[in-house]
Amino acid sequence: MSQSSPKKVDIQKYFLLGGLLLLLVLLFLFMAPFVGTIIIAAVIVTGVYPVHRVLTKKLRFPKSISSLISLILVAAVLLAPLSLVFFLAANEAADAYAIISEKITALTEKDISLIPSLLQNGFIEKITSRISEFAPISTNDIISGIKDFVGKISSVLLGQTTSILKNLSLFLLHLFVLLLAMFYLLKDGGRLVSYIKGILPLSEKYNHELFKKLSNLSYGIIYGVFGAAIAQGLLVGFGMAIVGVENAAFWGAVAALFSPLPYIGTSIVWVPVVIALAIGGNWFAALFLLIWGGAVVGIADNLIKPYIIGSSNALHPLAVLLVLLGGAFGFGLKGLIFGPFVLTLTLSFLHIYQLEYKSVLAKPKRAKEKKK
């Protein structure tokens, strides 16, 4: 009975690996819209897993029941306060929008006669007269321009509202996937980790080291993101209390909620307050809050988050800061999760590489000089 030739075995092996890689890429493309959501769910599950373990090991709850209880606790601790803050912030924003709309309507419709008198007094009159020397312009033209500008603002606000309503269903879908992924990761996460360890072509020692680092990093991300958010919320609330803003504690809580968002972060809370203070003539308070928000609050995020995340796996804070900023610019909110994971995986594989090729990488020692 003839045996298969080595060449035929090699072709079969390469075909199997190529087919597997192709199928994994296709599977990733199908799941790509939810990959970030699943990774975020895995990070949250890492933080709540000790509670799940107590319920299953010590209180003898079935895994399904303990997973459901842990999920309800997460929803109560995280989702309920976030929903409350969103609701209160929406009410405040609606009140502010109603007041602004009322003022604009009164200015452009009921008291439209006030605009010519405002334009004909003080430095505005000088500016319009200078402009009219080079281009024909009248007060009616300026009034018409103001009306058009207000109309465009209203159109933009209406368009943004429509966009938010369209994306609400997508947000609810991701929230459903997040909760469902958390439930099954709590219930079957141990078996999933064991399965992944079993198919990785690494020794038990390297598998243990790799997953230990990823677990520590998950804790570091949770503590880093929430720690920085709490610190920034306290700083924003403290700064607003100094300048005399009402409900400073509430706005500090809202700032903590928006802290993880890339690009804008807490500025979405304190920048409008700076503008309102400046319009109201409180220039000193506006300047103080501007410096406080831009320098103190902003620097706190760039110091606390990299330090806490980096300390979880002995990562350098500068490297963590760079991957956080790069991830935020490249992938948005998901980049805050992907960046540290990619950094940890890269350094872990480099460490395994150093251990595997230790004999090749070792530099020959210099011969000791003979003693005279």
Image: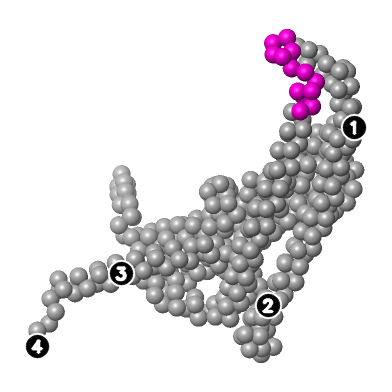
Q: Where is residue 116 in the image (x, y as percent from the top left)?
A: 86, 22
Foreground of the two, 366 or 124: 124
State the separation of the CA atoms marked 2 and 1. 59 Å
Q: Where is residue 90 in the image (x, y as percent from the top left)?
A: 79, 55
Instruction: Kindly identify the amino acid type of the residue bearing the numbered disc 2.
Output: Ser
Q: Position of residue 308 (x, y in %)?
A: 64, 56
Foreground of the two, 83 or 106: 106
Q: Nearer the viewer, mark 4 or mark 3?
A: 3
State the separation of the CA atoms marked 4 and 1. 103 Å
Q: Residue 70 carries which label?
A: 2
Q: Label 3 belongs to which residue?
A: 19
State the separation of the CA atoms marked 4 and 2. 60 Å
Task: Answer with mark 4 or mark 2, whichever residue precedes in sequence.
Answer: 4
| Range shown magenta | 131-144
Instruction: Kindly identify the amino acid type of the residue bearing the numbered disc 1.
Output: Asp
State the separation of the CA atoms marked 3 and 2. 39 Å
Residue at 54% in and 77% down: 189
Compared across the picture, whether 151 is left or right of 109 comes to left
Residue at 79% in and 63% down: 84
